[in-house]
Image: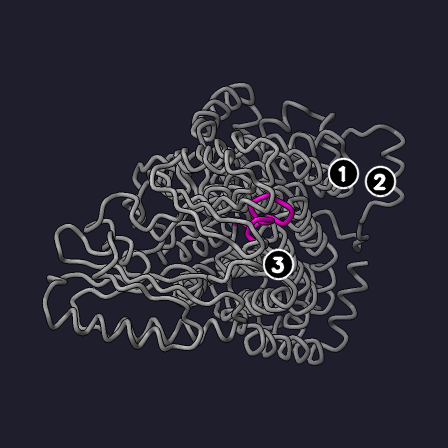
Amino acid sequence: MLTALARTATRRPLTVMLLWGLFLLLGFGLGTGVFARLSDNVPEVPGTESESAARYLEELDPAGSSITGVVAGTPVADAGLRAEVEQAMADVRKVAGVAAVPDPYATPGMISEDGRALIVPVTLEGGLDDDAEERTLDAAAERIREIDAPDVHVSGGPLLGLQMGERAQQDVKNAELISLPVVLALLLVVFGGLRSALLPLVVAVSGIAGAFLALFLFSEVTDISVYAIQVTTMLGLGLAVDYALLMLVRFREERRTTEDVLEAVHRTVAAAGRTVLFSGLTVAVSLTGLLVFPSLFLRSMGLAVAAVVVIDMLAALTLLPALLVRFGGRIPPARTPGDGEEEGRFFARVARFAARRKVAVLAVVVPVLLVLALPVSGMSIAVGDARQLPADSEARQLQDTVAAHFPPGTGVSPVVVVARPGTDEATADRIRALGPGATTRELPGGGAVIEIRPPGEADGAEATALVERVREVRGDAPVEVTGTAARLVDFRDMLAERAPWAALTVLAGIVVLLFAFTGSVLLPLRTVVTTLLSLAAALGVVVWVFQDGHLAGLLGAQGLGALSLTAPPLIVAIAFGLAMDYELFILARMREARLRSGDDREAVVTGLSRSGRVVTCAALLLAVVFAAFMTGGFSPILQIGLGLTLAVLIDATVVRMLLVPATMALLGRHAWWAPRPLRRAHDRFGLREEQPELPREKVPSGV
């Protein structure tokens, strides 16, 4: 199958390159339009109580969303400033789409006790379409920013989502400017030539274009999160480099035994292409677990990232072979080891050590990984607020200014209780009694909205406890709870309910693919266990840093007491797929060596010696890409970036270099065992590529 694909891609290389060139233009032209469609509505889960109540309010509540301005840094009682503020408020009230702008000088709680800050809330009309809302936001925000004061900031509501989208776009640009030159420099070191180093970057740029285009297409049918751009771009860039590196290393080694470039390309796709194909499929399958969750955010992320992985895989299997046919003749073959020189000597020594001291290696490595994973037991998730943004962002500056001048809890989103028609007054009174200062407003049709401001943060423990308490005391009354805290409670419940099914879906898919790749029943199980160890260790460090606050300052962040609710599911899904990536790199070599020699113990050593350099370089390049995306300072992306960086490095070093040879040695020949019926099924249906038989002394060390 892959040989046929290679012949198709190499028969007309210019046509293939032209088609991919058109794809790039489409991705960077049309695809970048997704930046204007990003949403920060991550916690929404269709079918939940909080979402039902929110939809009900949208239909009946005449009040729309709101934004907040803060003016600070000078005495607000100054006559000149007061005149400016009042004039600005009068102008904002005239903006089409603005429903209400209360006078901060006449509204209690709008002026700080120190007299050096005031809050300006602006409520929009309900029912505005996206374009009208954006025009209203821009006009109102710009007029408030024109107030002459040392500190004037506007954010909140839908404006916060727009600001996050702009920040995401800037962070992606900066990350690409940082990562691409560094990746090129590392590739120059690996290959020693500019031509070889540039080819992976061509594939990587295709991956980035694919990320933009996939997200744009998905934005036509569903909301796309502000996190999606950074996550899909970093993964698309990293995997493209990985796959291209794998193929190029094999191509250079095939060139040692044949001067025919076309034949070397065909052999490369037949051997390394099989690994790329299965790697792409395993990463995509790992992400299908996100489709089990009803959350639009998780589903759209799973589909978008899986689409990017498939695009990277196709680029490696079609575009790269076409490029190699045109330019591969000028790429020198890999160096042939001299007499008595062992290829991959360092990795061979590590493999022999781990296989010889298998019990000792397991007794040391496994407890260390379990200790790193301990913080996961106390992991908590939250929706988060503007503190997740860098200190120089306007939303963060607004929140910091409010925190510096106003009492704790000022501006915190309330727990919103929707009492539908038929709710008795006694139930409403019990709900109002749960929080001091609860306010009530009537809705058309006889319903009412009760707002209770919780102590602490909008999604803190007190707020979520208040949501649970309201749901307890309402009894059978037609009462629903929504707001930030209620959405977090529903999101947590959704994760707890669907996570086992997501895990089962992913594990079943991975086991089937690994069996198709190896023909073994035990290898997939061993792979899953060792991968979960490295994944838990990486996630434990993320909790220790970003939730507990240890060393967070070194990354320009702070301990927030909880992880962003986006981080854990994405880290788990993506890191699991990436771990399978490197496992396949190594197993492909081991399987190749075992088929040639029949020696199970030596196949482990040979496989690791010939794949260790590729796996290490690929992990380093991927870590560089992830680290570049951590320079933006957006806490959820920092969490995802650190989690994926650690997962990749731990997996490619500690797990694949030590645990894999140790467990393979422990299993011995049983590692490749499968029941006879499954063995016959694999022989009949398993994907394999017949390669030309090479002279024994000239067998290349393919990937």
The secondary structure type at the circle numbered 1 is helix
Name the one closer to the observer, 380 or 627.
Answer: 380
- Circle 2 sits on which residue? 682
The secondary structure type at the circle numbered 2 is helix
Read off the magenta span: 43-54
State the image quarter where residue 98 is shown: bottom left
State the image quarter where residue 150 is shown: bottom left
Q: Which mark is residue 304?
A: 3
Q: Amino acid at mark 3?
A: Ala
Give coordinates of residue 97: x percent, y percent. 44, 73
Give coordinates of residue 501: x percent, y percent. 69, 36
- Circle 1 sits on which residue? 515
Mark 2 or 3, nearer chain start: 3
C-alpha span from label 2 to label 1: 8 Å
| Nearer the camera: disc 3 or disc 1 | 3
* In the image, residue 148 lies in the stretch drawn in magenta: no
Residue at image coords 71%, 60%:
269
Which quarter of the rendering shows the N terminus?
bottom right
* In the image, residue 51 lies in the stretch drawn in magenta: yes
Q: Amino acid at mark 2?
A: His
